[in-house]
């Protein structure tokens, strides 16, 4: 006779089994094999593919470019999103819900569509160059396929994401602190710098971590737009498909995975504490 | 309680509905196996493949799913799928034909007409064979250029008025892109062994801001989104003559390159009969004339009607297009790709 | 009414610019999809539906595959995730929390890495749309799991279940008749999110697709790379017709999950 507790335990395990088995067979096992491939070389197990990322000029340049782009995107996004989230929480205006729906709509776009939006704005027949041509006779800012275009595309998907992440934290701000500062004569700017920003700093760090992780691992956007800069996910694709370097590609995949895992973890733990 | 019951059955209904959708949709998507064929690298807007596959479908009842992979992506896909091939036929730039055969991705099949193909343009075992060729040319959208004159030479392209207006396909993955690089290098006085003049030119050209799409860009030059596309000549003729697109085809003054394209049956093709039929068809009289009608030079002699020839550039222009040792072109391809990645892309 | 100083105007300007940046191209794209010829102006050559006809003729199979894959992904997520969520909600021990973390890891891994891993271990699936479903399930199941677990933890289920048990209901009856109706809303919300993510998934799908199993995002990529901007716009508009209602529903139901989407 099984005790009731045992029966409960079996029941719980039974319910969990399908999900756990699926994740084990279709995720954990493949990721382990990915790791093994990344460590494979002619001389047996070796970390050469990881060191290559740091030593081979083309790989290192891609890593550096990707990090630089992601940092730049994160900083600019945090600035803009903080502003946007405060406006969303504190300002009242008609059709606010519609507005919020519209600016979060890009969250459902694949990266390729984000790239296309930048082509619509800044491509050869883009809105901005067309308007400029109408006004000045010369087309300018046809930058969709340049590094600036890529940067703007990354902003396009980061701003909605970080804004929605920060809205919750802005809600939780204690207005009394700001009112106290005001009553002591602080201008809005000073209040913002001295009261609001410090209160928001855990949220900023956590949202920044999420933004950085998303930027580092973005593939579709760069694949659609990038011509000169080779971000690490695209390099991984190129090495796998053009040069058949599956070991190098696997090492890059694992590297990206570790980075995004760490930063996602930071996003969740710092966010929860703040 | 009755409320909960109704909600539960509503929920069950939703689940049931989804199941029905999936099963129904799953059944519908597969036409009979024997009536399908997968041809890697058969963009409808390239070399008249659209019309070719349509006519082939009408004649044999075999429906092809067009595929936009370029030659490099095709070889990669074949390698990845080697254990379980998904494609039946592959269309490739000639250097990629050598590569695919080297990697044992193709299997020999000799259709009738095979003997008419020159030896240097086919694999002796029949694993791949040239079906048609073109020449590297500038395809210029005169509307998009407006008042700017049409460029006539490789040297012209370095002029400031063409800045930001040019494109050619990615030379590290597309056969035509690599051919453009080879052609430019030759025109600048280089050779397959000597890429110095070529790379000197590339650096100056790239400073003009050249776009490198990865896949067929014909519709974009027709539209004028790309004013100057350095590509295969046939892609310019077809829309110009058949669709009245505002295009001009120019063979650069310093010289250019002939570009053969090959077809091969995939080793382990899931539908070998369909594959053989397609290869037969593209080399048959009917098929070769379809290429000719699309202004693509058929490989077999005597297939080009005079009215087609008269609408293309004169023979004197084509005298400037050279051939090279295509096997050698394939052998130096990797070092070219590495050098392009290191010196051009990384900047 | 607060005074409008220079500071507030500056903020308003930034907000307007950023909002326009995000919203305007979507509308331009939709409008431009009807343009006869999109050059310096859009309607010199009138309106037309011929780009939509082109997309339908050449890419309708992508719509079908996107829908099948999304539907299958949601169903599998429900079948795997709901029982697991119920089991996980039963305890707060380290084991349970650890397990929940483990099952949620795929969300934090880039889709391209998961795809490269799947190619190396499950290549026998290649050529089938199930290959793509596997990938989609792996990274969407955590969303379903989280949505349902959260709902379960707040509902007063233990009391209800005890009551049902005391009336003689078996475990499975309790699951079907007490638990599931109460998390119906969470399952619906989770399903909407999973559908949206599956329809819009590109990175992982791009590594696993074949010409016979192409989804909309992959088709969209092809159209942006090769075809003219009017066709790209028409195709994008069709795609938005699928995701916009889903996003609107998600907003309406109040949840705005931001994790897990790769670009």
Image (cartoon, rainbow, N blue to C red):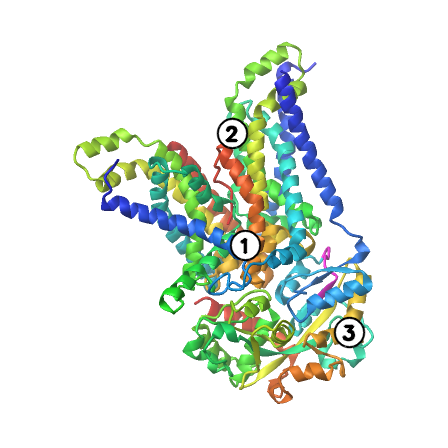
Q: Which of marks 1 and 2 is in front?
A: 2
Dot 1 lies on which element?
loop
Residue B73 picture location, percent across and down: 62, 63
| Residue A110 percent coordinates (x, y) | 53, 49
Q: Locate the N terminus of chain C and report the quarter of the image it occupies.
A: top left
Secondary structure of residue under mark 3: helix
Mark 1, Cα crowd under 10 Å, few <14 / some 14-19 / many 20+, is some
> Which residue bears the numbered disc 1?
A46
Locate residue A195: give its quadrant.
top left
Hey, which residue is sitting farthest left in the picture?
A185
| Residue extent of the magenta highlight | B83-90
The image position of residue C128, as x and y in percent, is 70, 49
Badge 3: residue crowd in 10 Å (few <14, some 14–19, many ≥20): many
Comparing B223 with B127, the one in front is B223
Which residue reaches farthest bottom?
Answer: B316
> Is residue A40 located in the magenta-colored stretch of the structure?
no
Q: Mark 3 points at which residue?
A: B283
Q: Which residue is drawn at 52% across and 57% down?
A: C32
- Asked whether the beta carbons under mark 2 and mark 3 sit within 8 Å of each other, the answer is no
**Residue B89 included in the magenta stretch of the image:** yes
Question: Can you identify the residue that label 2 sits on?
Answer: C97
Is residue B110 or residue B283 the one in the foreground?
Answer: B283
Residue B285 lies in quadrant: bottom right
**Are dots 1 and 3 in contact, CB under 8 Å?**
no
Q: Distance between the residues labelled 2 and 3?
A: 65 Å
Q: Can residue C248 be seen in this view?
A: yes
Give the prevailing secondary structure in the magenta stretch.
Answer: loop
- Chain letter of mark 1 equals A
């Amino acid at each position: 006779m099984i005790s009731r507790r045992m029966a409960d335990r079996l029941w719980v395990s039974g319910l969990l089994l399908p999900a756990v088995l699926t994740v084990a067979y279709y995720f954990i096992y493949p990721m382990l094999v990915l790791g093994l491939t990344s460590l494979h070389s002619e001389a047996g197990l070796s970390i050469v593919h990881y060191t290559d990322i740091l030593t081979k000029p083309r790989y290192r340049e891609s890593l550096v470019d990707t990090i630089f782009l992601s940092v730049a995107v994160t900083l600019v996004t945090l600035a803009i999103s903080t502003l946007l989230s405060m406006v969303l929480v504190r300002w009242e205006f008609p059709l606010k819900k519609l507005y919020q729906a519209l600016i979060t709509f890009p969250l459902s776009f694949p990266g390729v569509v984000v790239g296309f939006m930048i082509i619509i704005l800044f491509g050869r027949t883009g809105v901005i160059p067309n308007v400029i041509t109408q006004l000045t006779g010369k087309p300018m800012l046809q930058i969709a396929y340049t590094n600036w275009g890529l940067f703007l595309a990354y902003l396009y998907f980061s701003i909605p994401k970080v804004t929605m992440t920060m809205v919750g934290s802005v809600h939780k701000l204690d207005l009394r602190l700001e009112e106290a500062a005001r009553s002591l004569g602080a201008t809005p700017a000073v209040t913002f710098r001295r009261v609001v920003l410090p209160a928001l700093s855990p949220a900023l760090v956590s949202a920044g971590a999420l933004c950085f992780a998303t930027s580092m691992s973005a593939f579709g956007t760069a694949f659609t737009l990038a011509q000169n800069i080779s971000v690490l996910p695209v390099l991984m694709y190129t090495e796998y498909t053009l040069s058949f370097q599956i070991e190098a590609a696997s090492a890059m995949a694992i590297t990206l995975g570790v980075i995004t895992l760490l930063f996602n973890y930071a996003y969740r733990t710092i966010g929860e504490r703040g | 309680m009755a409320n909960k019951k109704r909600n539960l059955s509503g929920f069950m209904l939703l689940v049931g509905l989804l199941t029905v959708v999936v099963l129904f949709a799953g059944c519908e998507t597969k036409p009979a196996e024997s009536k399908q064929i997968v041809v890697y690298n058969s963009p409808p807007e390239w070399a008249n493949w659209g019309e070719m596959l349509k006519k082939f479908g009408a004649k044999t009842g075999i429906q092809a799913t067009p595929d936009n992979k370029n030659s490099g992506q095709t070889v990669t896909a074949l390698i990845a799928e080697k254990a379980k091939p998904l494609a039946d036929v592959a269309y490739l730039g000639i250097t990629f034909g050598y590569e695919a055969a080297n990697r044992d991705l193709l299997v020999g099949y000799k259709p009738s007409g095979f003997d008419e193909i020159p030896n240097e343009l086919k694999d002796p075992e029949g694993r791949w064979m040239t079906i048609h060729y073109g020449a590297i040319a500038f395809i210029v959208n005169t509307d998009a250029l407006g008042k700017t004159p049409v460029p006539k030479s490789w040297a012209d392209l370095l002029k400031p008025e063409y800045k930001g207006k040019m494109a050619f396909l990615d030379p590290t993955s597309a056969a035509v892109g690599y051919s453009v690089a080879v052609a430019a290098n030759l025109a600048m006085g280089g050779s397959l062994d000597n890429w110095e003049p070529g790379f000197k030119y590339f650096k100056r050209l790239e400073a003009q801001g050249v776009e490198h799409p990865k896949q067929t860009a014909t519709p974009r030059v027709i539209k004028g989104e790309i004013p100057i596309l350095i590509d295969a000549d046939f892609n310019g003729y077809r829309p110009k003559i058949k669709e009245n697109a505002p295009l001009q085809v120019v063979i650069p003054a310093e010289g250019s390159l002939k570009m053969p394209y090959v077809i091969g049956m995939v080793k382990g093709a899931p539908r070998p009969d369909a594959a053989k039929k397609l290869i037969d068809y593209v080399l048959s009289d009917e098929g070769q004339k379809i290429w000719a009608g699309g202004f693509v030079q058929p490989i077999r002699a005597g297939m080009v009607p005079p009215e087609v020839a008269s609408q293309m550039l004169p023979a004197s222009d084509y005298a400037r297009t050279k051939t090279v040792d295509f096997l050698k072109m394939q052998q130096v391809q990797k070092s070219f790709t590495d050098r392009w990645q290191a010196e051009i892309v990384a900047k | 009414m607060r005074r409008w100083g220079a500071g507030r105007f500056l903020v308003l300007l930034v907000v307007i610019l950023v909002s326009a940046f995000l919203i305007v191209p979507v509308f331009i794209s939709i409008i431009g999809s009807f343009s006869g010829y999109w050059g310096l102006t859009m309607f010199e050559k009138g309106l037309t539906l011929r780009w939509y006809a082109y997309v339908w003729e050449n890419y309708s199979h992508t719509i079908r595959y996107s829908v099948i894959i999304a539907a299958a992904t949601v169903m599998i997520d429900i079948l795997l995730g709901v029982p697991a969520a119920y089991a996980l909600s039963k305890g707060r021990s380290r084991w349970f929390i650890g397990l929940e973390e483990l099952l949620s890891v795929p969300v934090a891994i880039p889709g391209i890495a998961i795809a490269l891993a799947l190619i190396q271990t499950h290549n026998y699936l290649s050529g089938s749309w199930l290959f793509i479903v596997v990938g989609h399930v792996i990274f969407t199941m955590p969303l379903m799991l989280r949505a349902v677990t959260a709902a379960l933890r707040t509902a007063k289920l233990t009391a209800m279940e005890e009551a049902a048990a005391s009336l003689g209901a078996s475990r499975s009856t309790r699951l079907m008749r007490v638990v599931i109706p109460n998390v119906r809303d969470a399952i619906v919300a989770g399903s909407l999110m999973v559908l949206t993510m599956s329809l819009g998934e590109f990175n992982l799908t791009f590594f696993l697709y074949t010409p016979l199993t192409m989804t909309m995002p992959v088709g969209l990529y092809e159209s942006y790379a090769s075809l003219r901007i009017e066709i790209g716009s028409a195709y994008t508009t069709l795609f938005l017709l699928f995701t916009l209602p889903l996003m609107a529903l998600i907003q309406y139901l109040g949840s705005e999950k931001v994790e897990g989407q790769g670009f």
